[in-house]
Amino acid sequence: MKILRAIGLAAIAALALIAVSGAGSAAAAETTLCKSAAISPYCASKDRYPKETAIEATKTEFQVDPGFGPTGITVCAESAMKGQTNAQAGEPLSASISTWTFSGCTRNGKACTITAKNLSYAGSLSWSSGDDGALALSNSGKGQPRLFVHCGSWYECEWDMPSLAVEGGNPGQLAIPTTTLVKGTGFNCPATTTLKATYSVSSPKPVFVARGEISNPGTGLCKINQSPCPQAYLYPEGTELEAETSDVKIETNVSTITCSEGSLAAQTTARSDNPLPLEMTAFALDGCNFPGSARAASRSMNSAPGRSPGTANSRNGEARWPGGWCAAAPSTAPSASVAPISKTGARR
């Protein structure tokens, strides 16, 4: 087998960018709570909040508007909620809200009572975009989550509790944008009632809704030194590789040919695969010395016109083409951006 060893820094860098993921099966990336937005929308394993992470938030805004005009709006001086995650990651991420309290609630200066009924609530957190997600509330066995409002003789009603938007940040936020409440029952219930609320998250802090990744066999080119390589940082199909070297050795069964110059160009024909398919578009050697030749002298060698398909695999750090040609990064290669990739069935 003929072996081409490219010692040039460009060749090493190009080959070192090729990396392989661990084994696994293709699946949609899971939702997780992350401590950092460094590789948003993904989250490295070391930055994921663990199972049973406490969720605590206090209101910055809360108002119920029954549509009776400004004097009919009910506001609360204080409101807080507590809960926890039930897993480190999931699709959706399982959570629960155990307490949700309201105090100092008034309508036009008169006291009102607001209660979150049928606690605790089951929660399902799903990533939506960027660092954000949505928390849907459901029956945990005690009844459908309901919001109860009693304002003296004015009205006494309850509605289904809407989902909450989760906004990543430091701190993060739980929010109910102006939402029309549904399934209202009770006394003198308004035809249309809206709820608007914002809560500042004190735990966990900071917090970002992110995509965890499930490993899948595959080799790809990664732009950063991150394991696994987030999908957003994979180089696309058709990425061109160019390498030059000043020290080439071609080992044959007769002798070793040395060349003072070498260049190689190729491009990927997939974003990731196992192995990653490459197409060599150019290959040239110059200043080559053939020991033992009657006319040992500097010569040039060039590839034939056209494209030659090959593959790359970081398990052995080689890029191969038909005929036994193999470009290999030597064991003394300097540090470069190397990281496993992982595929997702979607997402994130």
Image (spheres, helix red, strand yellow):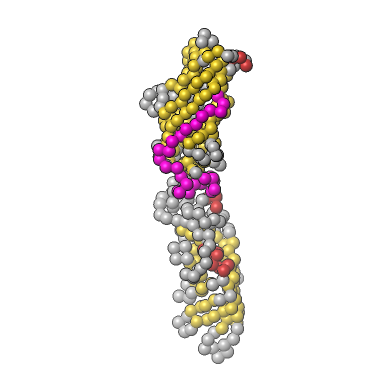
Is 115 in the magenta? no
What x and y, as percent, mark residue 78?
A: 52, 24
151 vs 14: above or below = above
Question: Is residue 208 or residue 317 the one in the foreground?
Answer: 208
Is 58 in the magenta? yes
What x and y, as percent, mark residue 1?
A: 45, 75
Residue at horizontal 48 percent and vertical 79 percent from the top? 251
Residue range highlighted in magenta:
36-62
257 vs 266: above or below = below
Residue at horizontal 57 percent and vertical 79 percent from the top? 259
What x and y, as percent, mark residue 171?
A: 54, 37
Residue at horizontal 43 percent and vertical 38 percent from the top? 53
In this picture, residue 122 sits left or right of residue 42:
left
Most distant residue in the left direction = 141
What is the quadrant of residue 139 in the picture? top left
* Residue 273 seen by the camera: no
94 vs 48: above or below = above
In this picture, residue 120 sits left or right of residue 108:
left
In this picture, residue 254 sits left or right of residue 223:
left
